[in-house]
Amino acid sequence: VSLSIGDTTLALQHNILERLPEYTEILLLTPDILVERIENELKNKSYSDRVRIVEFETIRIKDGRFFLVRPEKDQLVQVDTVDSFRARYSGTEWAQDLFEVMRRPNGRVVLHISEVYKYYSSIDPKANASVVADNGYLKEISIADTEVVRGPLVFQGGNILYSEVDGRKVVFCGGDVLHKTRMVWRGLIGEELGDERIVELIAMIHGADEVVVAAIDGGDRLQPELLYHLDQAMIPLDEGVVGVARIVGQPPTEEAEDRGEGLVMQYLEKLRTSLVSSGFKLVDVDMTVENLLRYQNTVNAIPYVDARTHQKTMLMPVFSEQSEWEQEIVKKNIETFESLGYRVVTVATEADKGKGGLHCLVNVLE
């Protein structure tokens, strides 16, 4: 679990931390300027004895150059040194996006870190100095038998998922991973990297037999803004089974059309076709158009097998401001997961107000 310098309390993370299994060890990646405040807050939490704070230094920059990774611009975009970019290592509340967890054949856990999280910075705007990635604070993570590796890909963890079908390991990858990787290689290395080569790298790094790329049709391989990460559109369940978001109910509003609801439908349809072609059985996880517009994605849940009871369990998000009809959809989704053998634990969250969800808040190491 991680915090940014903007997270002054555990309000966003509390409900999910409270519902993690009691045997869970919680590593809380925390900016140095917040450590004392968070330690005081933890004194009153039921899970406090299971939390280990991992502190990282927040480096502030008075002047410098900043380059955002903006796929829709197809280039690294230099921005002014406004306040929001004056901390080089500022952290994030979305722990899922920090890295992908893999395991070597000898059992050693590997945290595969992206080349960059969101931006690069240079301390001296006049010097010809190299730019520095904003995820440098991840070097503070030190866990026994765990290896931290920075790879050549540019990704956020919610945009890469895994499953198996018919004995094959399959990696699901949002199209923005390809686009951002191409863009950063072009901007920093001066080299054009084709999509086929990037897919080969994804397969090699993750030891996958197949890579399924989910993107809107077209040469840019982008994803819709309303489903900008793959874990907002799908959730791997049992081997060979994947839950996929399905929009039900009333026709789209003018707002929905303006914000790209049509692209979402195209994206989900293409994703379903790709999953079926790869041999997966699909399960519908319903949402309304209003859920979509508010980033209330039920598929952004956390499935796991309880280490003590061996019971399949689903930590499923529930959101505020739900209509009666949306509450009925919540019940239907619970029944869907229960039909697959899951014990469903609902978790109230307001992560949607930051365009995230439960799965975004946690990264499971083992």
Image (spheres, rainbow, N blue to C red):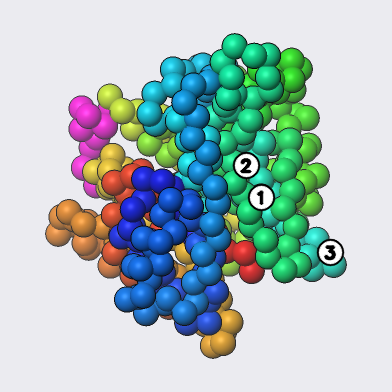
Q: Nearer the viewer, mark 3 or mark 2?
A: 2
Could you tell which of marks 3 and 2 lies nearer the N-terminus?
3
- Give how far across and how far down residue 26 sits, in percent: 52, 69
Image quadrant holding the C terminus, namely bottom right
Q: How dense is the environment of label 2, judged by Cα within 10 Å: few (below 14), some, or many (20 and up)?
A: some
- Mark number for residue 127? none
Furthest-top residue in this view: 126
Contact between marks 2 and 1 (CB within 8 A): the answer is yes
* Alpha carbon distance from label 2 to label 1: 6 Å
Could you tell which of marks 1 and 3 lies nearer the N-terminus?
3
- Which residue position holds label 2? 136
- Mark number for residue 139? 1
Furthest-left residue in this view: 324
Residue range of the region highlighted in magenta in the rendering: 246-257
SS for callout 2: helix
- Which residue position holds label 3? 105
Q: How dense is the environment of label 3, judged by Cα within 10 Å: few (below 14), some, or many (20 and up)?
A: few
Q: Amino acid at mark 2?
A: Gly
